[in-house]
Image (tube, rainbow, N blue to C red):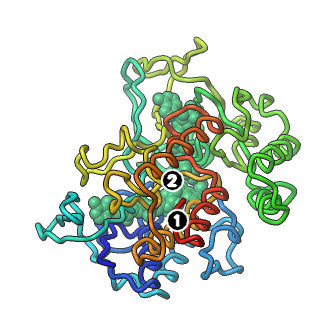
Amino acid sequence: MGRTCIIGAGSSGVTVAKALKEAGQAFDIFEIGSQIGGMWRYGNDNGRSSCYASLHIDTSRPNLGYSDFPIDPKLPDFLSHRQFLEHLEAYAAAHGIPEKVTFNTRVESVVPEEGGYRVTLGSGEVRDYDRVVIATGHLTDTRQPDFPGTFNGESLHSHHYRTADPFIGKRVLVVGIGNSAVDIAVDLCRRAEHVTLSTRRSAWVMPKYLMGVPIDQWSGFLGRRLRLPSPMVRRIMAQLIKLGVGDQRRFGLPRPEHPMYREHATLSQELLPMIGHGYIDVKPNVAELRGDGVAFVDGSEAEYDAVIYATGYEVTFPFLDRWVFDPDLQLGELYRRMVVPAHPGLIHAGLVQPVGPTIPLVEVQGKWIAALASGAMTLPSREGMDAEIRAHRDYQRRVYVDSPRYVLEVDGKLYSGQMKADMASGVAG
Ligand SMILES: Cc1cc2nc3c(=O)[nH]c(=O)nc-3n(C[C@H](O)[C@H](O)[C@H](O)COP(=O)(O)OP(=O)(O)OC[C@H]3O[C@@H](n4cnc5c(N)ncnc54)[C@H](O)[C@@H]3O)c2cc1C
Ligand SMILES: NC(=O)c1ccc[n+]([C@@H]2O[C@H](COP(=O)([O-])OP(=O)(O)OC[C@H]3O[C@@H](n4cnc5c(N)ncnc54)[C@H](OP(=O)(O)O)[C@@H]3O)[C@@H](O)[C@H]2O)c1
């Protein structure tokens, strides 16, 4: 059923390639860097990885592996970025993917044309495809707050943070309370002179372990083994976490106004103890940058040597004209979080932020895309796609916090079930 172009050889592009190969589908795969791994290759020569030296994955080993390629049980509960990369490399090699990748090659443009898509490579070469899978990642282009005033010290985004070395003995402000912010604050705090974490909305900080068991294994037990629906699982988990962690206000961390089950999980085993040991303090949002210091919205002010903005990412696709796909308007307008309804051969992979791990979820997306490519599954009508998108947007509005950060949020278990049902019936629903 024609040729597919995959853009990107991170964990998403690799698993889509593997699924297409197994379905006997022809494809090319292009990658800017000289090796696979994307975000998980520390110091990747693609210049796009957000990986810092201390990064460990926040999904425990049994829940992270691919369905037919489990992770070596001798590895620890929470893999380091290096260990995950080695696992991904072994998975890719076992399925003959690296030899299929054209490395050091950027896709410069993708233009829909009669009956397919015209892809232009960095070399100037032009190729035509029946469909294009965009697996370029969405955690590279920094989201920068526009606080009034100027700051004289060093400012950087968490995307560029690698180690605590440049901050030894310095006073550092970390803005945000997502997983990057809490990881970086903890990584810095014993070596910096002091660390402040500033948050506008706060978050429920979940430990990585509860009663000695990785927290995602508790939710996996409730959801998969006991087959409880996701909202109930999340409510039970919220109660268990409150029992395990106690009242985070004791640590100066405000209780968010939204319930725990409405937010993207912020996980840290160490943040609260480090606050408790006096290494980190917590402030509300920044009101103004004031030269050598920062004023906060509660009227307090403090001096800093550096500000690290762990404020998340903007999603961009520089190879697509906005008439083809405008990420500012259409990120939430993808059928099954993948297909651009106006150009149904344009398919995103990995453009989700799940409750649960991304990596095995994209494995299911890969199989779904392969079913489409092979003709084993068909898409609904344009009206059917639009109706599914509306239903998903309604669900998101009901369930998650109202912040740009949530436009890609999905419930991993629910979403994976929808894709599997589509494949089983042969008609995407
Ligand atoms: C700090 C951090 C920690 C994370 N931790 C977890 C975690 O614990 N668990 C989890 O499930 N997820 C985690 N994630 C999310 C993670 O990004 C995804 O799980 C996943 O690995 C992303 O893979 P990807 O292939 O979609 O994107 P990437 O890994 O970004 O790969 C995209 C690839 O596309 C290539 N590319 C981009 N543009 C082009 C182009 N125009 N032409 C050719 N090639 C191109 C890039 O060079 C890159 O190699 C984390 C993300 C961050 C930033
Ligand atoms: N160890 C790990 O596994 C790990 C580590 C790092 C990242 N990740 C993953 O990578 C992805 C990106 O995480 P991230 O932490 O980099 O980004 P993120 O999840 O988007 O969090 C961004 C944080 O910055 C805040 N923020 C955004 N704009 C702001 C503004 N203008 N002013 C003040 N605060 C602002 C957000 O607050 P609001 O909530 O109010 O919007 C939020 O607290 C997530 O999926 C995350 O789970 C995983």
Tell me the crowding category of disc 1: few under 14, some 14 to 19, or many 20 or more residues within 10 angstroms, Cα based: many
Examine the rendered structure and indicate whether residue 141 appears above or below residue 117.
Answer: above
Residue of label 1: 362
* Left or right placement of residue 185 versus residue 271 in this view: left
Q: Position of residue 316 (x, y in %)?
A: 34, 47
Which kind of residue does numbered mark 1 sit on? Val
Ligand 1 neighbours mark 1 (CB distance < 8 Å): yes
Question: Looking at the picture, does residue 5 appear above or below residue 191?
Answer: below
Q: Quadrant of ligand 1?
A: bottom left
Total marks shown come to 2
**Vertical placement of residue 202 versus 60, above or below:** above
What amino acid is found at the position of numbered circle 2 in the picture? Val
**Secondary-structure class at tag 1:** helix
Residue that protrudes farthest toward the top in the picture: 299
Nearest to N terminus: mark 2 or mark 1: 2
Name the residue rendered at 50%, 46% in the picture. Answer: 387
**Disc 2 to disc 1, how far (Cα)?**
9 Å
Beta carbon of the mark 2 residue lies under 8 A of ligand 1: no
